Image (tube, rainbow, N blue to C red):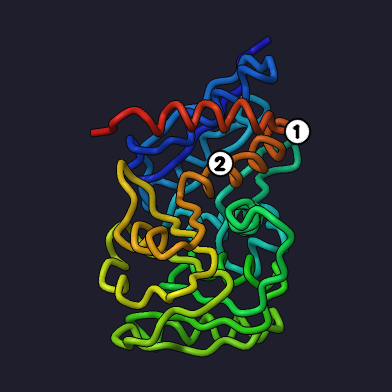
Amino acid sequence: MTTRRAAVLGSPIAHSRSPLLHRAAYAALGLDWAYDAIDVTSEQLPEFLASCAWPEWAGLSLTMPLKTDVLPLLDDVSETAQLVRAANTVTFTSQGRYGDNTDVAGMQRALREAHGAEWSPRRGAIIGSGATARSALAALARLGIDDVTVIARSPERAQELVELGGRLGVPVSLGAWESTAPIDADAVVASVPPGAADSLVDRVPQTPGVLLDVAYGDSATLLTQAWTRAGGRVADGLDLLLWQAVDQVRLMAGLDAPVEAMRLALSADREVPHP
């Protein structure tokens, strides 16, 4: 039988830990599948997608900005991906290309796991206003959050989140990046690149809620370090990467993902320095 293929696309993409997670899942499931990291730009995406034929190709994981760029190239898109205008997952079938978003559910799971007990959060905050922030807002809404404050450098760009909050039934207010007020919320998602929220460390509250910082690298960001020192619970980008990959494996392979095998592979990799 021909080995099926899957890959993560982006540019740059060599740093991605997605191959580690998916390969660990395939091994645990006994699947003779290949999963690669392939450098693909927005301009190259249409041609690359056209080369991905079913049944050889099972699916793709996408990084930004491909999550948004891919939408008009798909035959069908999930309700979640349509809502947040981002598909981080493409699956191939005999009927065509299907786009989905596993970031939203991944954020929910990462936040709940970090909290570690029964939890009914009411106030949310999002740092940033890009595509990841849209997924974060949907995740907070599904956690039962009543209102969300968006802390963004560009109020104009953040206005899109106010409109999305209206569709989700969650009031969204805008907070100034330069404010000194504590980020006082039950659940906080930092949706910006590594280091971009360093200037907000002085706004860590005395009694922090749960923070998900989607950035990941060889060391914790200054924000997550300050949050932890203040006694807050923290999830990072690798926690999100795990949980969004769990649903990707299910979508691509049609099987329940081996969460612990994937977590073990990721934990071992955390101990290895990366250039």
Disc 2 marks which residue?
242
Amino acid, disc 2: Leu
Query: Height in image: 120 above or below 114?
Result: below
Q: Which mark is residue 6?
A: none
Judging depth in this view, the residue of 175 and 16 nearest the camera is: 175
Disc 1 marks which residue?
256
Residue at point 44%, 59% (across, down): 213
Residue at point 63%, 65% (across, down): 139
Judging depth in this view, the residue of 31 and 187 nearest the camera is: 187
Amino acid, disc 1: Asp
Q: CA distance from mark 2 to mark 1?
A: 14 Å
First along the sequence among labels 2 and 1: 2
**Local crowd size for mark 1, using a 10 Å CA cut-off: few (<14), some (14–19), many (≥20):** some
**Could you say where residue 150 lies in the image, as x and y percent from the top left?**
47, 81
Judging depth in this view, the residue of 26 and 231 nearest the camera is: 231
**Could you say where residue 202 lies in the image, as x and y percent from the top left?**
30, 75
**Could you say where residue 35 lies in the image, as x and y percent from the top left?**
51, 26
Residue at point 51%, 76% (across, down): 125
- In the picture, measured across the screen, residue 43 lies left or right of residue 126, that is left
Residue at point 64%, 61% (across, down): 81
Residue furthest to the top in view is 1
> Quadrant where the N terminus lies?
top right
Query: Height in image: 174 above or below 2?
Result: below
**Could you say where residue 242 lies in the image, as x and y percent from the top left?**
56, 41
Q: Looking at the rendering, which quadrant does residue 214 occupy?
A: bottom left
